[in-house]
Amino acid sequence: MYEDLCSEARKYSQDCLDLLKGDKRIVASENYHELSAYILDFAIKEAKSYEVYLVGKAKQFPNDQAVKICATQLITTTVAAFVSSFSDLDKDLQTSIADAQSASIGADKCDKAIQNEKPEFDPQPIHTRNNEMFLLSVISVLAINHLT
């Protein structure tokens, strides 16, 4: 089922498959409600892991304002949006979709802040994780849309 969903992600289909295939619950999902819930749960865990990474990076480079903003504000909004989408899944599908869509905003703003700052470290891992947050947002929306 997740393969069909990833094919809907078109140009991101291979990235989607690579990202989701490691979660056994996602792979074994039997309906779109399960798949949506498991993808959102996965997204929450990934966003929280990324938040921990950014906080560590902010401590390592305390003078880097972009990383500080990413760690203390922007990724927090991403985590909150995925959590909100998950909690709305059984109550209000349109709100759940809107929350999942908004999850990419913090990562996008973080990516732009890092690019504008020209950090003293390799920004590629942050860029990669921001892209992952964007992809999880897209995949979440695609999955939830199947419930409407």
Image (cartoon, rainbow, N blue to C red):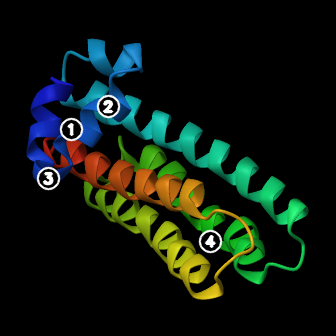
Mark 3 touching mark 1, by CB under 8 A?
no
- Asked where in the image residue 46 lies, by quadrant, the reply is top right
The residue identified by callout 1 is 14
Residue type highlighted by circle 2: Asp
Could you say which is closer to the camera, residue 46 or residue 102? 46
Q: Could you say whether the residue bearing mark 1 is in a helix, strand or loop?
A: helix
The residue identified by callout 4 is 74
Measured in 3D between alpha carbons, the distance from the residue under mark 4 to the one under mark 2, in whole angstroms, is 25 Å
19 in relation to 148, above or below: above
Total labels: the figure holds: 4
Please tell me whether mark 4 or mark 3 is closer to you in this view: 3
- Asked where in the image residue 113 lies, by quadrant, the reply is bottom right
Residue type highlighted by circle 4: Leu
Identify the disc placed on residue 11. 3
Residue type highlighted by circle 3: Lys
Q: Could you say whether the residue bearing mark 3 is in a helix, strand or loop?
A: helix
The residue depicted at 15 percent of the width and 48 percent of the height is 9
Q: Could you say whether the residue bearing mark 4 is in a helix, strand or loop?
A: helix
Residue type highlighted by circle 1: Gln
Measured in 3D between alpha carbons, the distance from the residue under mark 3 to the one under mark 2, in whole angstroms, is 13 Å
How far across and down, in percent of the image, does residue 145 sit?
Answer: 16, 49
Q: Could you say whether the residue bearing mark 2 is in a helix, strand or loop?
A: helix
Mark 2 touching mark 1, by CB under 8 A?
yes
Please tell me whether mark 4 or mark 2 is closer to you in this view: 2
The residue identified by callout 2 is 18
The residue depicted at 9 percent of the width and 45 percent of the height is 8
The residue depicted at 15 percent of the width and 27 percent of the height is 3
Measured in 3D between alpha carbons, the distance from the residue under mark 2 to the one under mark 1, in whole angstroms, is 6 Å
